[in-house]
Amino acid sequence: MEEICLRIIEGIEGYCRVNFSRNEPVFSVHFPDYPVMPGVLLLDLLIGLGARIRGIPPDKIFVKGLNKVRFRQQVRPGDQIELEARVTETRLIRGRALKDGRVVLEAEFLLQEEEDEG
């Protein structure tokens, strides 16, 4: 998997492109005869983009809520998707993934930076 972030405007919005090679390990188990990228992994990519926009380090992401999550199409080996996300005035992040200009995934989510215990 190759992820290229095209633009991040901290606190506002971000855009990334993700290429899925035919050799991704997940495709050998999900599903061997008809490989499909698991929706939860696509959602994780979108949450990661949201965290970058908010300036949250990858090891400190805490998902406080998910709303309106919809999986619209399958992502298969060799596909390229575009991720886009924007922070709303209420700090909710609205994002979606597109393949060939068509929505694959859309979601709203709320993130928080996890605090260190101690």
Image (cartoon, rainbow, N blue to C red):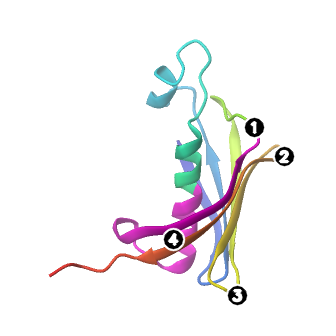
What mark, if any, has residue 89 been given in the picture?
3
Please identify the residue farthest to the left as the structure is shown: 118
Could you tell me how far apart the alpha carbons at marks 2 and 1 are, in whole angstroms? 8 Å
- Are dots 2 and 1 in contact, CB under 8 Å? yes
Where is mark 4, residue-wise? 51
The residue at 40%/72% (across/down) is: 57
In the rendered image, residue 22, in percent from the top left (x then y), is placed at: 57, 26
How far apart are the alpha carbons under marks 3 and 4?
Answer: 16 Å
Cβ–Cβ under 8 Å for marks 4 and 1: no
Q: Give the mark, 2 or 4, whose residue is nearer the N terminus.
A: 4
Mark 3 or mark 4: which is in front? Answer: 3
Answer with mark 3 or mark 4, whichever residue precedes in sequence.
Answer: 4
Q: Are marks 3 and 1 in contact (CB under 8 Å)?
A: no
Task: Report the Cα–Cα distance between label 3 and label 1.
Answer: 29 Å
Q: Is residue 89 left or right of residue 56?
A: right
Q: Secondary structure at mark 1?
A: loop
Residue on which disc 1 sits: 73
Mark 3 or mark 1: whose residue is earlier in sequence: 1
Q: Residue at x 75, y 37 (%)?
A: 73
Residue farthest along the top direction in this orientation: 33
Specify which label sits upstream in the sequence, 3 or 2: 3
Q: Is residue 92 above or below residue 67?
A: below
Q: Amino acid at mark 2?
A: Arg
Residue 102: image tag:
2
Q: Nearer the viewer, mark 4 or mark 1?
A: 1
Q: Which mark is nearer the camera, 2 or 1?
A: 1
Between label 3 and label 2, give the one nearer the viewer.
3
Q: What residue span does the magenta drawing correspond to?
A: 46-73
Query: What kind of element bears circle 3?
Result: loop
